[in-house]
Amino acid sequence: MHRSFFSYNVTRPYPFRWFTPTVVVGAIIAAALISFINFASAGYELVATSSNNPNATIDNSSQYGGVRWPAYFIQKTQATCAPATLPLGTLVYTTNNALAYTLNSVWRFKDNGRRENLGSLVYLNNNLQNCSMSQVRIELSGRYKQSQLILATTHIGILVSALVTCTVDIDTSHAESAAQGPTYFELDAKYELIHPKTRTFLSRNATKSPSLYWGESLLSAYLLLTAKAYVDGAKDKDWYNDDVYDAAIILTRQAQTGNGTREETMTNNFFHVECYTEHGYCKPHDMPSLLRGGSARWFEYPYPNIWNRVDILGKAMWFTVLTDLGFNKSTVPNMFVYPDLLANLTANLTNEAHWWKTAREDANKKKYDFKVNMQMDSGLALASFDRNQTPQAPLGAAPAFLSTNYICQVPQTKSPGILFISIFVADLVLLQAVWLVFRLIVDTVSQRRYPSMGYCSGCTENIELVGVGVTDSSSTAALIPPSRPVSPLQLG
């Protein structure tokens, strides 16, 4: 007979009653368990989506049908979000949706202490840290710069802006730059009431966000009051003939270093003032001196009637920015967070709102031009804050992040057809591995206890006919012609 290079094993049934039910039951249990595991590891695929809240997207428990899979099963299909790149000049809001901010500059410091300027901010919902105000600017635009809409309503344009510097911690371990530590960036916030280029205070709510509600109320009211005071101050000028000229006011904190106190915020000497008008500038740089005015050198004390309102407008912008960025306290206590400070800041609001209403009505009756022809917003607070009023919404600055869109990858169950094929193929591979391991264990143990199981059925019968004990391996080998031993557990 020809002997091929290839061979096959002769098989025989297992001589155990328990073997067949054990294999059937074990196969069912193993198939169910393996299918369950394969569904977790191979039943999902990643799809791209956008999100403005990456933390919620990554932690969303409904992504896996509400099942909390062990992390080692779903390592390759866990949700991830890529950082957003914000170039310089980008307009952003915070998650509190109050003011609009322009990204002015971004920088880090190298190991040698040198500053490295960057062209963009890499941001992934990082906590805003160490935010500190630099200045508040009030830009007044006269009649020669204004549109007809502004001339007809306020007679003068006012833009209130603020510069604030913050830091975020960003992983720079893989960056080529040698700069380490926090990333610094400067934001420029702007507020306009008449014909704004960008909308502000997108979600006004006196109950859920009372501090921001008071911030918007004071900004709206005192912008009109400052405009009116500036126009009235211009009437006293010799050149006044419906001409209102430009002016610029820059407010910085009077105390340059150290943490401020509540008393500091409540005084009218909180700001250091720089100002430039059509025929003058601020030589004294404190509010009390500017309020008193000067007769000998009048051009160094311009518009003494505006500074009380400028002080409130500046503080309203200063602390609204801090509230929008989520800070209850920065270098000074936030006046929109503490009831006693808010009561102090709004102490004259009731009188101012009443005066505004009465003055406009009087102008209409006497048919003269009030010049600033807007009503105060009735949807905002027009009365001073009463800290004893109950019930009262709790003041506070809600935690804030920069609001932007992120590209994320989230898990999604595969389509039924692909899901079936993926699990079926994976099941076959693992079930075959389990079967091979099971056979190896059973074969090894059985052949040690029953040496005759290593031979075919016919060989065993020949051994029994000649009366040789099957336990004597040397005698068995002498009676049986040389042949290939068989594995009794290889089922055909």
Image: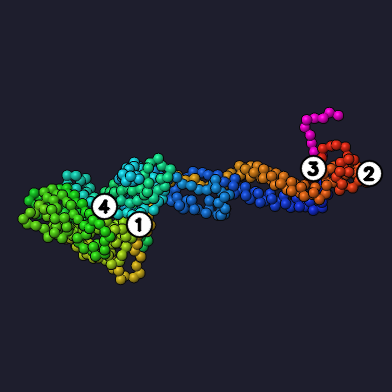
Q: Which of marks 2 and 4 is nearer the N terminus?
A: 4
Look at mark 4 in the image and give the residue it sits on.
Answer: 134
Q: Which range of residues does the magenta coloring cover?
A: 1-10
Amino acid under disc 3: Ser
Relative side of 138 to 132, left or right: left
Mark 2 secondary-structure assignment: loop
The answer to whether 272 is drawn above or below residue 76 in the figure is: below
Q: Which of marks 2 and 3 is in front?
A: 2
- x, y percent for residue 280: 12, 50
Q: Is mark 1 on a helix, strand or loop?
A: loop
Q: Residue at x 43, y 51 (%)?
A: 53
The residue that appears at 50% across and 48% down in the rendered structure is: 79
> Which of pointers 1 and 4 lies earlier in the amino acid sequence?
4
C-alpha separation, residue under disc 4 versus residue under disc 3: 85 Å
- The answer to whether the residue labelled 1 contacts the one labelled 4, judged by CB atoms less than 8 Å apart, is no
Residue tagged 2: 466
Choose the circle earlier in sequence order: 2 or 3: 2
Q: Mark 1 points at which residue?
A: 326
Nearer to the camera, 405 or 375:
405
